[in-house]
């Protein structure tokens, strides 16, 4: 496997850099394969969602679509793919941010009874409570 940093995903998804975007596209569409897939960490997924929101002003629906696109690429292995998918659904349903939903999912998966937060939006997610 080959690890992929956030900027590779962003250049591929957004296609906004005349030099780096074609390189990222060639890497993902032509160089990676079943024998040598790309590995995407949850951290890279969270960073990608954050940059799409903050830098590119993507809506929650657009961020979710970008995450779904990454999940559908056969040559990518996404760390904790089911948690990433669940967090994407929470985002689409307007319950919280992608990052908060992923935090909640990972906490639940680790056996936490609840996740404490001061974030009012995160409180709409299952398992989140005020301290």
Image: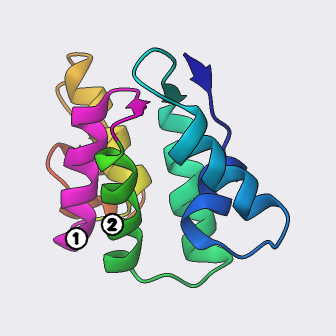
Residue corresponding to mark 1:
92
Q: Residue at x 27, y 17 (%)?
A: 110
Looking at the rendering, which quadrant does residue 16 occupy? bottom right
Residue at x-position 34% and y-position 43%: 102
| Vertical side of 63 occupied by 61: above or below | below
- Determine which of the numbered discs, if any, sits on residue 23 in the image: none
Front-most of 79 and 28? 28
Q: Which residue does the image show at 14% across and 49% down from the upper left?
A: 126
Q: Quadrant of residue 83?
A: top left
- Residue 30 falls within the magenta-colored stretch: no
- In the drawing, does residue 83 fall left or right of residue 118? left
Q: Is residue 28 left or right of residue 18?
A: left
Query: Residue 34 at what x, y percent from top left?
Result: 39, 21
Q: Is residue 69 above or below residue 85?
A: below
- Asked whether the viewer can see residue 25, the reply is yes
Residue 74, x across and y down, in percent: 33, 37
Q: Which residue is mark 2?
A: 64
Q: Position of residue 58 (x, y in %)?
A: 50, 81
Q: Which residues are magenta?
A: 74-95
């Amino acid at each position: 496997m080959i690890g992929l940093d956030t900027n590779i995903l962003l250049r591929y998804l957004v296609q906004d850099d005349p030099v780096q975007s074609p390189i990222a596209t060639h890497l993902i569409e032509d160089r990676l394969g079943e024998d040598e897939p790309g590995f995407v960490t949850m951290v890279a997924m969270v960073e990608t969602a954050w940059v799409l929101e903050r830098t590119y002003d993507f809506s929650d629906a657009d961020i979710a679509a970008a995450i779904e696109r990454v999940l559908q690429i056969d040559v990518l292995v996404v760390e904790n793919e089911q948690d990433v998918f669940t967090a994407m659904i929470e985002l689409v349903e307007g319950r919280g941010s992608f990052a908060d939903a992923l935090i909640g999912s990972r906490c639940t998966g680790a056996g936490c009874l609840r996740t404490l937060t001061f974030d009012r939006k995160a409180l709409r997610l299952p398992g989140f409570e005020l301290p």
